[in-house]
Image: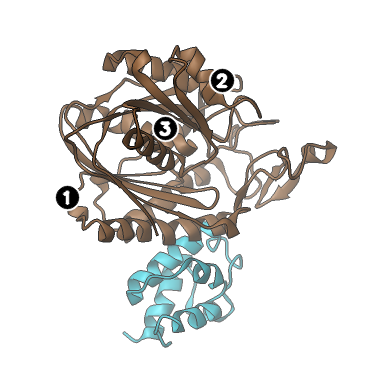
Amino acid sequence: MTNEEKYNQVFITCFKVDAAELSSLAYGSVPAWNSVGQMVLVEELEKAFDIEVEMEDILDIRSYAQGKVVLKKYGVKI
Amino acid sequence: MAFLHFNHIRIAGFGAGVPKNVVENDEGAVSSDVYSASDFVKTTGVRRRRVDFELTTSDLCLPAAERLIADLGWDKKEIDALIFVSQTADYFLPATACILQDKLGLGRECYAADVSLGCSGWVYGLSYVASLIESGTIRKAILLAGDAKRHYQVRHFDPLFGCAGTVTAVEFAQETERLCFHFGTDGSGFDAIIIPDGGARNQVSVDSFREEEFEGKMVSRLQTRMKGMDVFAFGISTVPKSIKKLTTQYNLTLEDYDYFIFHQANMKMNEVIRNKLKLPEEKVPYSMPDFGNTSSASIPLTIVTELREVISGQKTNIITCGFGVGLSWGTAAMTLDADCVISELTEVQ
Protein backbone atom coordinates (compact mmCIF):
# COMPACT_ATOMS: atom_id res chain seq x y z
CA MET A 1 0.00 0.00 0.00
CA THR A 2 1.41 3.43 -0.91
CA ASN A 3 1.59 6.29 1.56
CA GLU A 4 -1.27 8.02 -0.25
CA GLU A 5 -3.44 4.93 -0.04
CA LYS A 6 -2.67 4.59 3.66
CA TYR A 7 -3.37 8.29 4.22
CA ASN A 8 -6.69 8.12 2.37
CA GLN A 9 -7.74 5.01 4.21
CA VAL A 10 -7.23 6.72 7.57
CA PHE A 11 -9.58 9.55 6.61
CA ILE A 12 -12.15 7.21 5.05
CA THR A 13 -12.18 5.04 8.17
CA CYS A 14 -12.18 7.87 10.71
CA PHE A 15 -14.86 9.99 9.10
CA LYS A 16 -16.82 7.37 7.13
CA VAL A 17 -16.60 9.28 3.85
CA ASP A 18 -16.11 8.21 0.22
CA ALA A 19 -12.82 8.69 -1.58
CA ALA A 20 -14.48 11.30 -3.79
CA GLU A 21 -15.11 13.52 -0.77
CA LEU A 22 -11.54 13.54 0.47
CA SER A 23 -10.17 16.55 -1.38
CA SER A 24 -12.73 18.91 0.19
CA LEU A 25 -12.65 17.32 3.65
CA ALA A 26 -11.88 19.74 6.48
CA TYR A 27 -12.42 20.14 10.21
CA GLY A 28 -16.14 20.61 10.76
CA SER A 29 -17.11 19.73 7.18
CA VAL A 30 -18.57 16.42 8.35
CA PRO A 31 -20.12 15.77 11.80
CA ALA A 32 -17.50 13.19 12.71
CA TRP A 33 -14.62 15.64 12.27
CA ASN A 34 -15.00 17.49 15.55
CA SER A 35 -12.44 17.79 18.35
CA VAL A 36 -12.90 14.13 19.26
CA GLY A 37 -12.63 13.09 15.62
CA GLN A 38 -9.41 15.10 15.38
CA MET A 39 -7.93 13.09 18.22
CA VAL A 40 -8.91 9.78 16.63
CA LEU A 41 -7.53 10.97 13.27
CA VAL A 42 -4.16 11.85 14.79
CA GLU A 43 -4.00 8.52 16.61
CA GLU A 44 -4.67 6.64 13.36
CA LEU A 45 -2.16 8.71 11.37
CA GLU A 46 0.48 8.06 14.02
CA LYS A 47 -0.19 4.33 13.86
CA ALA A 48 -0.26 4.22 10.06
CA PHE A 49 3.03 6.05 9.61
CA ASP A 50 4.75 5.18 12.90
CA ILE A 51 5.24 8.81 13.92
CA GLU A 52 4.46 10.97 16.96
CA VAL A 53 2.80 14.23 16.04
CA GLU A 54 3.66 17.27 18.18
CA MET A 55 0.90 19.26 19.85
CA GLU A 56 1.14 22.29 17.55
CA ASP A 57 1.07 20.04 14.49
CA ILE A 58 -2.02 18.24 15.78
CA LEU A 59 -3.76 21.61 15.77
CA ASP A 60 -2.50 22.33 12.23
CA ILE A 61 -4.17 19.30 10.66
CA ARG A 62 -7.32 21.20 9.77
CA SER A 63 -8.04 19.61 6.40
CA TYR A 64 -7.22 16.58 4.27
CA ALA A 65 -4.83 18.75 2.24
CA GLN A 66 -3.16 20.38 5.25
CA GLY A 67 -2.57 17.00 6.81
CA LYS A 68 -0.26 16.09 3.95
CA VAL A 69 1.82 19.22 4.59
CA VAL A 70 2.09 18.42 8.29
CA LEU A 71 3.09 14.79 7.68
CA LYS A 72 5.86 15.95 5.35
CA LYS A 73 7.55 17.46 8.44
CA TYR A 74 7.74 13.91 9.80
CA GLY A 75 9.32 12.54 6.66
CA VAL A 76 6.07 11.12 5.28
CA LYS A 77 5.78 12.01 1.60
CA ILE A 78 2.33 11.64 0.11
CA MET B 1 14.35 19.76 33.35
CA ALA B 2 11.98 19.34 36.27
CA PHE B 3 12.74 15.89 37.69
CA LEU B 4 12.52 15.19 41.41
CA HIS B 5 13.16 12.06 43.41
CA PHE B 6 12.86 11.09 47.05
CA ASN B 7 14.25 8.12 48.91
CA HIS B 8 12.51 8.39 52.27
CA ILE B 9 8.88 8.98 51.43
CA ARG B 10 6.18 6.46 52.21
CA ILE B 11 2.59 6.87 51.09
CA ALA B 12 0.67 5.71 54.14
CA GLY B 13 -2.85 5.93 52.82
CA PHE B 14 -5.61 7.33 50.64
CA GLY B 15 -9.16 8.48 51.25
CA ALA B 16 -11.85 10.27 49.28
CA GLY B 17 -15.10 12.08 49.94
CA VAL B 18 -17.87 12.67 47.41
CA PRO B 19 -21.37 14.10 47.66
CA LYS B 20 -24.04 11.49 48.30
CA ASN B 21 -26.14 13.05 45.53
CA VAL B 22 -25.80 11.23 42.19
CA VAL B 23 -26.66 12.99 38.92
CA GLU B 24 -27.18 10.81 35.86
CA ASN B 25 -26.00 12.24 32.54
CA ASP B 26 -29.36 11.92 30.83
CA GLU B 27 -31.09 14.40 28.54
CA GLY B 28 -32.06 16.53 31.53
CA ALA B 29 -28.49 16.96 32.70
CA VAL B 30 -26.80 17.28 29.30
CA SER B 31 -28.12 20.37 27.57
CA SER B 32 -26.56 21.04 24.19
CA ASP B 33 -27.80 21.77 20.72
CA VAL B 34 -24.71 20.10 19.31
CA TYR B 35 -24.78 16.64 20.90
CA SER B 36 -27.24 14.33 22.64
CA ALA B 37 -26.80 12.89 26.13
CA SER B 38 -25.98 9.47 24.71
CA ASP B 39 -23.32 10.96 22.41
CA PHE B 40 -21.89 12.84 25.37
CA VAL B 41 -21.67 9.69 27.46
CA LYS B 42 -20.16 7.74 24.57
CA THR B 43 -17.45 10.34 23.99
CA THR B 44 -16.58 11.32 27.53
CA GLY B 45 -17.33 8.05 29.29
CA VAL B 46 -19.05 10.01 32.08
CA ARG B 47 -22.34 8.23 32.84
CA ARG B 48 -23.03 9.90 36.16
CA ARG B 49 -21.40 12.22 38.65
CA ARG B 50 -21.54 13.18 42.29
CA VAL B 51 -22.74 16.75 42.56
CA ASP B 52 -23.82 19.05 45.38
CA PHE B 53 -24.42 22.79 45.22
CA GLU B 54 -23.72 23.40 48.89
CA LEU B 55 -20.70 21.28 49.78
CA THR B 56 -17.32 22.87 49.15
CA THR B 57 -14.13 20.99 48.42
CA SER B 58 -13.03 21.31 52.03
CA ASP B 59 -16.39 19.89 53.16
CA LEU B 60 -15.57 16.76 51.13
CA CYS B 61 -11.92 16.55 52.15
CA LEU B 62 -12.60 16.95 55.86
CA PRO B 63 -14.60 13.75 56.60
CA ALA B 64 -12.38 11.76 54.24
CA ALA B 65 -9.34 12.97 56.17
CA GLU B 66 -10.96 12.20 59.52
CA ARG B 67 -11.69 8.67 58.35
CA LEU B 68 -8.22 8.03 56.95
CA ILE B 69 -6.45 9.43 60.02
CA ALA B 70 -8.60 7.14 62.18
CA ASP B 71 -7.97 4.14 59.90
CA LEU B 72 -4.24 4.82 60.09
CA GLY B 73 -4.34 5.28 63.83
CA TRP B 74 -2.31 8.49 63.49
CA ASP B 75 -2.12 10.98 66.32
CA LYS B 76 -3.29 14.28 64.80
CA LYS B 77 -0.67 16.20 66.75
CA GLU B 78 2.01 14.34 64.78
CA ILE B 79 0.75 15.71 61.46
CA ASP B 80 3.05 18.64 60.87
CA ALA B 81 2.04 19.64 57.34
CA LEU B 82 -1.20 20.05 55.41
CA ILE B 83 -1.28 21.00 51.74
CA PHE B 84 -4.66 21.79 50.17
CA VAL B 85 -4.72 21.63 46.36
CA SER B 86 -7.80 23.07 44.72
CA GLN B 87 -9.12 25.72 42.39
CA THR B 88 -12.29 26.00 44.46
CA ALA B 89 -11.02 27.33 47.76
CA ASP B 90 -13.57 28.23 50.42
CA TYR B 91 -12.66 31.93 50.24
CA PHE B 92 -10.41 34.21 48.23
CA LEU B 93 -8.73 34.65 51.56
CA PRO B 94 -7.78 33.12 53.96
CA ALA B 95 -6.22 29.94 52.62
CA THR B 96 -8.46 26.90 53.05
CA ALA B 97 -5.49 24.95 54.43
CA CYS B 98 -5.59 27.15 57.53
CA ILE B 99 -9.30 26.44 58.03
CA LEU B 100 -8.74 22.71 57.59
CA GLN B 101 -5.84 22.73 60.08
CA ASP B 102 -8.24 24.00 62.71
CA LYS B 103 -11.23 21.83 61.75
CA LEU B 104 -9.08 18.71 61.76
CA GLY B 105 -7.61 19.62 65.13
CA LEU B 106 -4.01 19.60 63.93
CA GLY B 107 -1.38 21.30 66.04
CA ARG B 108 -0.52 24.98 65.77
CA GLU B 109 3.02 24.06 64.73
CA CYS B 110 1.54 22.73 61.50
CA TYR B 111 2.80 23.94 58.10
CA ALA B 112 -0.33 24.66 56.03
CA ALA B 113 -0.68 26.13 52.55
CA ASP B 114 -2.97 26.16 49.53
CA VAL B 115 -1.83 25.26 46.03
CA SER B 116 -3.91 26.53 43.10
CA LEU B 117 -3.70 23.83 40.46
CA GLY B 118 -6.31 21.68 38.77
CA CYS B 119 -5.88 18.39 36.98
CA SER B 120 -2.12 18.15 37.61
CA GLY B 121 -2.56 19.25 41.20
CA TRP B 122 -2.41 15.97 43.08
CA VAL B 123 0.96 15.06 41.56
CA TYR B 124 2.32 18.52 42.28
CA GLY B 125 0.89 18.40 45.79
CA LEU B 126 2.57 15.08 46.43
CA SER B 127 5.91 16.58 45.43
CA TYR B 128 5.34 19.51 47.84
CA VAL B 129 4.59 17.14 50.70
CA ALA B 130 7.54 14.88 49.85
CA SER B 131 9.87 17.88 49.67
CA LEU B 132 8.70 19.11 53.07
CA ILE B 133 9.18 15.73 54.70
CA GLU B 134 12.67 15.20 53.30
CA SER B 135 13.83 18.71 54.15
CA GLY B 136 13.42 19.12 57.88
CA THR B 137 11.63 17.87 60.95
CA ILE B 138 8.22 17.13 59.43
CA ARG B 139 7.56 13.39 59.59
CA LYS B 140 3.86 13.07 58.80
CA ALA B 141 1.82 15.16 56.37
CA ILE B 142 -1.52 15.12 54.60
CA LEU B 143 -2.31 16.23 51.09
CA LEU B 144 -5.92 17.27 50.50
CA ALA B 145 -6.89 17.67 46.85
CA GLY B 146 -10.06 18.16 44.91
CA ASP B 147 -12.65 20.45 43.44
CA ALA B 148 -16.32 20.82 44.21
CA LYS B 149 -18.79 23.67 44.34
CA ARG B 150 -17.62 25.94 41.53
CA HIS B 151 -17.71 29.69 41.99
CA TYR B 152 -20.79 31.40 40.57
CA GLN B 153 -22.31 28.16 39.29
CA VAL B 154 -25.53 29.57 37.88
CA ARG B 155 -27.64 26.83 36.33
CA HIS B 156 -25.96 23.48 36.51
CA PHE B 157 -22.61 21.83 36.56
CA ASP B 158 -20.93 20.98 33.30
CA PRO B 159 -21.89 17.31 32.79
CA LEU B 160 -18.21 16.40 32.48
CA PHE B 161 -17.32 17.42 36.00
CA GLY B 162 -18.03 15.81 39.35
CA CYS B 163 -17.24 16.91 42.89
CA ALA B 164 -14.69 15.15 45.07
CA GLY B 165 -12.23 15.84 47.85
CA THR B 166 -9.41 13.47 48.65
CA VAL B 167 -6.74 12.89 51.25
CA THR B 168 -3.34 11.29 50.86
CA ALA B 169 -1.29 10.55 53.96
CA VAL B 170 2.47 10.68 53.57
CA GLU B 171 5.25 10.00 56.06
CA PHE B 172 9.00 9.72 56.43
CA ALA B 173 10.42 6.22 56.16
CA GLN B 174 14.05 5.23 56.48
CA GLU B 175 13.66 2.22 54.22
CA THR B 176 11.35 2.63 51.27
CA GLU B 177 11.18 2.56 47.47
CA ARG B 178 12.12 5.65 45.50
CA LEU B 179 9.40 8.16 44.61
CA CYS B 180 10.17 10.07 41.42
CA PHE B 181 8.54 12.83 39.43
CA HIS B 182 8.59 14.67 36.14
CA PHE B 183 6.85 18.04 35.76
CA GLY B 184 6.10 20.48 32.96
CA THR B 185 4.21 23.69 32.24
CA ASP B 186 3.06 25.50 29.10
CA GLY B 187 1.41 28.75 30.10
CA SER B 188 0.95 29.75 26.45
CA GLY B 189 -2.13 27.55 26.69
CA PHE B 190 -3.50 29.36 29.77
CA ASP B 191 -6.84 29.99 28.07
CA ALA B 192 -7.37 26.42 26.87
CA ILE B 193 -9.26 25.82 30.12
CA ILE B 194 -10.30 28.98 31.88
CA ILE B 195 -12.93 30.75 33.95
CA PRO B 196 -12.41 34.21 32.43
CA ASP B 197 -14.03 36.41 35.10
CA GLY B 198 -14.08 36.53 38.87
CA GLY B 199 -10.36 36.87 39.56
CA ALA B 200 -8.29 40.02 39.85
CA ARG B 201 -7.71 40.31 36.08
CA ASN B 202 -11.39 40.44 35.07
CA GLN B 203 -13.44 41.25 38.13
CA VAL B 204 -17.09 40.31 38.38
CA SER B 205 -19.43 42.63 36.50
CA VAL B 206 -22.93 42.40 35.11
CA ASP B 207 -21.46 41.13 31.85
CA SER B 208 -19.86 38.23 33.71
CA PHE B 209 -23.30 36.64 34.13
CA ARG B 210 -24.40 37.07 30.52
CA GLU B 211 -24.37 33.73 28.71
CA GLU B 212 -22.70 33.38 25.32
CA GLU B 213 -22.03 30.45 23.04
CA PHE B 214 -18.70 28.74 23.48
CA GLU B 215 -17.94 25.51 21.62
CA GLY B 216 -21.62 24.66 21.28
CA LYS B 217 -22.64 25.47 24.83
CA MET B 218 -24.13 28.53 26.48
CA VAL B 219 -21.82 29.61 29.29
CA SER B 220 -21.28 32.72 31.34
CA ARG B 221 -17.84 34.22 31.92
CA LEU B 222 -17.94 32.70 35.40
CA GLN B 223 -18.09 29.12 34.16
CA THR B 224 -15.32 26.88 32.92
CA ARG B 225 -14.57 27.17 29.19
CA MET B 226 -12.58 24.51 27.50
CA LYS B 227 -11.09 24.59 24.00
CA GLY B 228 -11.67 20.94 23.26
CA MET B 229 -9.22 20.65 20.37
CA ASP B 230 -6.39 22.35 22.25
CA VAL B 231 -6.93 20.21 25.33
CA PHE B 232 -7.04 17.01 23.31
CA ALA B 233 -3.90 17.92 21.39
CA PHE B 234 -2.14 18.77 24.64
CA GLY B 235 -3.20 15.60 26.43
CA ILE B 236 -2.44 13.06 23.77
CA SER B 237 0.94 14.56 22.92
CA THR B 238 2.18 15.55 26.39
CA VAL B 239 1.21 12.66 28.65
CA PRO B 240 3.00 9.84 26.79
CA LYS B 241 6.10 12.03 26.48
CA SER B 242 6.14 12.90 30.17
CA ILE B 243 5.90 9.23 31.11
CA LYS B 244 8.67 8.33 28.68
CA LYS B 245 10.87 11.12 30.05
CA LEU B 246 10.36 9.89 33.61
CA THR B 247 11.09 6.28 32.75
CA THR B 248 14.18 7.26 30.79
CA GLN B 249 15.52 9.59 33.49
CA TYR B 250 15.16 6.97 36.24
CA ASN B 251 15.72 3.86 34.15
CA LEU B 252 12.23 2.51 34.83
CA THR B 253 10.45 -0.17 32.80
CA LEU B 254 6.74 0.25 32.11
CA GLU B 255 6.21 -3.51 32.38
CA ASP B 256 7.27 -3.36 36.04
CA TYR B 257 4.26 -1.21 36.91
CA ASP B 258 0.98 -2.76 37.97
CA TYR B 259 -1.27 0.24 37.35
CA PHE B 260 -1.23 3.50 35.42
CA ILE B 261 -3.58 5.99 36.98
CA PHE B 262 -4.21 9.00 34.82
CA HIS B 263 -6.16 12.14 35.49
CA GLN B 264 -9.72 11.25 34.50
CA ALA B 265 -10.05 13.80 31.69
CA ASN B 266 -12.43 12.06 29.35
CA MET B 267 -12.59 8.51 28.14
CA LYS B 268 -11.70 9.13 24.49
CA MET B 269 -8.59 11.11 25.34
CA ASN B 270 -7.50 8.72 28.08
CA GLU B 271 -7.94 5.76 25.76
CA VAL B 272 -5.81 7.41 23.07
CA ILE B 273 -3.12 7.95 25.70
CA ARG B 274 -3.40 4.34 26.84
CA ASN B 275 -3.12 3.08 23.27
CA LYS B 276 -0.12 5.28 22.54
CA LEU B 277 1.68 3.82 25.54
CA LYS B 278 0.53 0.30 24.54
CA LEU B 279 -0.86 -0.33 28.03
CA PRO B 280 -3.29 -3.20 28.61
CA GLU B 281 -6.82 -2.22 29.62
CA GLU B 282 -6.62 -4.00 32.97
CA LYS B 283 -3.71 -1.81 34.06
CA VAL B 284 -5.53 1.47 33.49
CA PRO B 285 -8.47 1.91 35.89
CA TYR B 286 -11.16 4.54 35.39
CA SER B 287 -13.37 6.27 37.93
CA MET B 288 -14.78 8.75 35.42
CA PRO B 289 -17.82 6.65 34.36
CA ASP B 290 -19.30 7.00 37.85
CA PHE B 291 -17.67 10.17 39.16
CA GLY B 292 -16.78 12.29 36.11
CA ASN B 293 -13.74 14.49 35.77
CA THR B 294 -12.92 15.45 39.35
CA SER B 295 -9.91 17.64 38.65
CA SER B 296 -7.08 17.19 41.17
CA ALA B 297 -9.09 14.53 43.02
CA SER B 298 -9.26 12.17 40.08
CA ILE B 299 -6.07 10.16 40.68
CA PRO B 300 -6.56 9.41 44.41
CA LEU B 301 -10.31 8.97 43.86
CA THR B 302 -9.57 6.32 41.23
CA ILE B 303 -7.25 4.55 43.69
CA VAL B 304 -9.97 4.58 46.36
CA THR B 305 -12.89 3.54 44.16
CA GLU B 306 -11.25 1.22 41.64
CA LEU B 307 -8.21 -0.27 43.39
CA ARG B 308 -9.05 -0.44 47.09
CA GLU B 309 -10.20 -4.04 47.05
CA VAL B 310 -7.62 -5.09 44.47
CA ILE B 311 -4.36 -3.79 45.91
CA SER B 312 -4.98 -3.61 49.65
CA GLY B 313 -2.45 -5.76 51.44
CA GLN B 314 -0.04 -6.10 48.56
CA LYS B 315 2.93 -4.17 47.28
CA THR B 316 1.91 -2.28 44.14
CA ASN B 317 3.92 -0.25 41.66
CA ILE B 318 2.00 2.59 40.08
CA ILE B 319 2.61 5.42 37.66
CA THR B 320 0.32 8.42 37.85
CA CYS B 321 -0.02 11.39 35.53
CA GLY B 322 -2.06 14.54 36.08
CA PHE B 323 -2.50 16.96 33.19
CA GLY B 324 -4.73 19.84 32.25
CA VAL B 325 -5.51 23.43 33.16
CA GLY B 326 -2.45 25.66 33.10
CA LEU B 327 -1.42 24.00 30.91
CA SER B 328 0.34 21.92 33.52
CA TRP B 329 1.36 18.30 33.91
CA GLY B 330 3.08 16.03 36.38
CA THR B 331 3.99 12.35 36.35
CA ALA B 332 5.00 10.26 39.35
CA ALA B 333 6.24 6.69 39.77
CA MET B 334 5.85 5.13 43.19
CA THR B 335 5.48 1.93 45.15
CA LEU B 336 2.62 1.43 47.59
CA ASP B 337 3.64 -1.05 50.24
CA ALA B 338 1.40 -3.81 51.61
CA ASP B 339 0.51 -1.71 54.66
CA CYS B 340 -0.78 1.26 52.69
CA VAL B 341 -4.29 2.00 53.99
CA ILE B 342 -7.05 2.79 51.53
CA SER B 343 -10.15 3.97 53.35
CA GLU B 344 -13.67 3.26 52.18
CA LEU B 345 -15.22 5.99 50.05
CA THR B 346 -16.88 8.61 52.24
CA GLU B 347 -20.27 9.85 51.06
CA VAL B 348 -21.08 13.31 52.33
CA GLN B 349 -24.46 15.07 52.60
Quadrant in which the N terminus of chain A is drawn:
bottom left
Disc 2/disc 3 C-alpha distance (Å): 19 Å
Disc ID at residue B299: none
In terms of secondary structure, where does tag 1 sit? helix
Label 2 close to label 3 by CB (< 8 Å): no
Assess disc 3: are there few (<14), some (14-19) or many (≥20) residues with their C-alpha within 10 Å of its C-alpha: some
Colour brown maps to chain:
B
Residues marked 2 and 3, same chain: yes
Between B268 and B15, the residue placed more toward the observer is B15
Q: B245 left or right of B150?
A: left
- Picture quarter containing residue B259? top left
Mark with earlier residue (1, 3): 1
Q: Residue furthest front?
A: B136
Residue at image coords 66%, 43%? B195
Counting from the top left corner in percent of width and height, residue B209 is at 78, 37
Residue B229 vertical position relative to residue B46 in the rendered view, above or below: below
What amino acid is labelled 1 in the image? Asp
In terms of secondary structure, where does tag 3 sit? helix
Write down the residue under mark 1: B256
Disc ID at residue B290: 3
Mark with earlier residue (2, 3): 2
Q: Is residue B27 visible?
A: yes
What amino acid is labelled 3 in the image? Asp
Residue at image coords 58%, 65%? A30
Write down the residue under mark 2: B55
**Chain A, colour shown:** cyan
